[in-house]
Image (cartoon, rainbow, N blue to C red):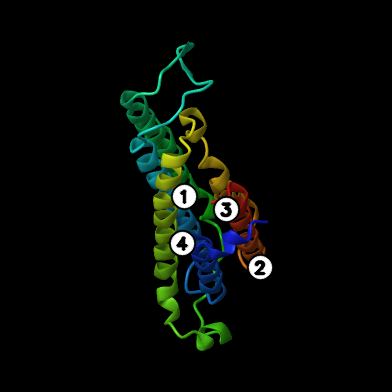
């Protein structure tokens, strides 16, 4: 494992954001639905910055990339078109999921809010942790965005491959949503939150960002 990963602020922000959501759920200040919405927003943020990254590409290669069966040469029209194509299919995917999610969680039993031992230890009012987690998700992706821009100048990416790079990172979110159809809240959902946190960090490390 590259030790430089642990010097990456984005890594720690993603870790903290996930931990804050777990704490919020455990203290019952947020519902399972709100947690899923937070993960949905994280996924949307990832897609937004990836769209900007493709759009702002100055140099890239099109090896093994074809349109209508024909090879294409790298030019500004290609990356602009691919950026908006990515935005459309990624956006449709997320809008459909957002509409589908409430039907999964409509029968999920939620516990009442409570002043738990964890909330008593918190230096920050527990009701603000949810919003702080969302800010951490956004800032982590912003930092990665600027890092990717620098990397793309040094090592121009393959634009065909770039179209699909965000999807492995959002798999944990979709698995959590699908799992929601088979759980009834409580500790079962907590396990999924922990698994999501672990997979988030593993995917971050594997991408070597």
Marks 1 and 3, Cα distance to the nearest angstrom?
Answer: 14 Å
Q: Is residue 98 left or right of residue 189?
A: left
SS type, badge 1 = helix
Asked whether the beta carbons under mark 1 and mark 4 sit within 8 Å of each other, the answer is no
Kindly identify the residue that appears in the image at 44 percent across and 73 percent down.
129
Kindly identify the residue that appears in the image at 35 percent across and 42 percent down.
52
- Counting residues from the N terminus, which is met first, the one under dot 1 or under dot 4? 4
Q: Nearer the viewer, residue 14 or 35?
A: 14
Circle number at residue 187: 2
Q: Which residue is denoted by mark 1 in the rendering?
A: 43
Residue 180 visible, this orientation: no
Query: Comparing marks 1 and 2, which lies closer to the viewer?
Result: 1
Circle number at residue 196: none
Q: Nearer the viewer, residue 103 or 41?
A: 41
Image location (x, y in percent) of residue 22 = 56, 69
Local packing at callout 1 (Cα closer than 10 Å; few below 14, some 14-19, many 20+) is many
- Counting residues from the N terminus, which is met first, the one under dot 1 or under dot 3? 1
- Counting residues from the N terminus, which is met first, the one under dot 3 or under dot 2? 2
- Counting residues from the N terminus, which is met first, the one under dot 4 or under dot 3? 4
Q: Which residue is denoted by mark 4 in the rendering?
A: 34
Circle number at residue 204: 3
Query: Comparing marks 1 and 3, which lies closer to the viewer?
Result: 3
Q: Is residue 55 above or below residue 102?
A: above
Query: Comparing marks 3 and 2, which lies closer to the viewer?
Result: 3
Q: Nearer the viewer, residue 55 or 2?
A: 2
Kindly identify the residue that appears in the image at 49 percent across and 30 percent down.
158
SS type, badge 3 = helix
Asked whether the beta carbons under mark 4 and mark 3 sit within 8 Å of each other, the answer is no
Q: Is residue 202 above or below residue 84?
A: below
Image location (x, y in percent) of residue 123 = 46, 86
Image location (x, y in percent) of residue 181 = 60, 51
């Amino acid at each position: 494992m590259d030790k430089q990963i642990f010097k990456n602020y984005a890594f720690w922000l993603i870790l903290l954001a996930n931990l804050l959501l777990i704490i919020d759920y455990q203290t019952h200040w947020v519902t399972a639905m709100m947690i899923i919405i937070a993960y949905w927003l994280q996924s949307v943020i990832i897609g937004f910055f990836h769209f900007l990254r493709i759009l702002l590409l100055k140099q890239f290669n099109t090896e093994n990339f074809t349109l209508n069966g024909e090879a294409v040469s790298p030019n500004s029209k290609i990356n602009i078109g691919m950026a908006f194509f990515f935005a459309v299919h990624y956006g449709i995917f997320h809008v459909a999921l957002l509409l589908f999610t409430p039907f999964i969680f409509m029968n999920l039993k939620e516990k009442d809010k409570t002043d738990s031992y964890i909330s008593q230890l918190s230096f920050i009012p527990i009701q603000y942790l949810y919003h702080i987690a969302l800010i951490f998700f956004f800032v982590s992706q912003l930092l990665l965005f600027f890092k990717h821009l620098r990397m793309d100048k040094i090592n121009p990416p393959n634009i065909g491959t770039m179209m699909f790079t965000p999807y492995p990172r959002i798999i944990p979110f979709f698995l959590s949503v699908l799992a929601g159809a088979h759980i009834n809240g409580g500790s079962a959902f907590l396990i999924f939150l922990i698994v999501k946190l672990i997979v988030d960090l593993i995917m971050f490390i594997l991408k070597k960002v």
